[in-house]
Amino acid sequence: MIFREVEDRDLVIKAAKGNVDSFNLLVSRHEKRVFNYLLRIVGHREDALDLTQDVFLKAYQNLTKLSDVERFSPWLFRIAHNEAYSLLRRNRPDTAELIYDPPTGGARDGMFPVELNIAVERALGRLSADQREAVVLKIFQGFKFEEMADILDLPLSTIKSRLYSALDVLKGALAPVKG
């Protein structure tokens, strides 16, 4: 594991006291992960870019309200989750289930990396929005179950259930076709 010269918790403390350079360093460390998470949730690059800016603005404005500086990353992703779902509700107010529109293209045995990516995106499209978010947070973002529960404000058992049922769907969708 590579240790950073300055830990996030130290940057959060300094940023909460008004040190803009510390906050800018936090942004540079986390913006790619936040953007990728938002892109997988909202499905549109421009929306994800706008939301990423909104997330960091809200984080900066509310940094003094963060009670545990060690939990900055889950707290930041909770803000991202709220912003993404607010946008989706505004854009689709009468849609209970979020629609995931994966890229089109073919996938077959002996896939190239691009084809594999397309197959994974299609498989993710088979998941419910809740399952997909659990997969994105755990597999793509690397959060622990407890952190996911904080981000989504759900019981640990619900998080695990969503992830394991999603992994079952993905396993079936990505299993090689035997003929």
Image (tube, rainbow, N blue to C red):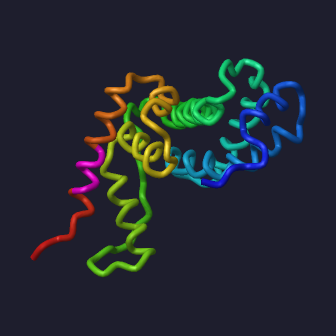
**Looking at this view, is 88 or 130 the one in front?**
130
Task: Answer left or right for 148 relative to 84.
Answer: left
Whether residue 141 is situated above or below residue 149 in the rendered picture: below
Q: Quadrant of residue 91?
A: top right
Residue 8 in the magenta stretch? The answer is no
Query: Is 153 located above or below residue 140 in the figure?
Result: above
Decide if residue 49 is on the left or right side of residue 158: right
Q: Position of residue 24 (x, y in %)?
A: 82, 43
Q: Quadrant of residue 165?
A: top left
Residue visible at 87% across and 25% down in the picture: 17
- Give the answer, above or below, for where 115 lies relative to 101: below
The answer to which of 142 and 5 lies nearer the viewer is 5
Pick the front one: 12 or 119: 12
Residue 28 position, x and y percent, is 75, 49
Count of numbered badges drawn on the protein: 0
Residue 167 falls within the magenta-colored stretch: yes
Q: Position of residue 81 (x, y in %)?
A: 55, 34
Q: Residue at x 36, y 53 (%)?
A: 124
Near-viewer residue (23 or 129): 23
Q: Residue at x 60, y 54 (%)?
A: 1
Q: Is residue 156 above or below residue 51?
A: above
Which quarter of the rendered picture does the C terminus lie within? bottom left
- Region rendered in magenta: 166-171
Please tell me which residue is depicted at 30% across the width and 81% down the height of the picture: 110
Along the horizontal axis of the image, is 147 left or right of 177?
right
- Residue 168 image point, x, y percent: 23, 48
Please name the predominant secondary structure of the magenta segment in the image: helix
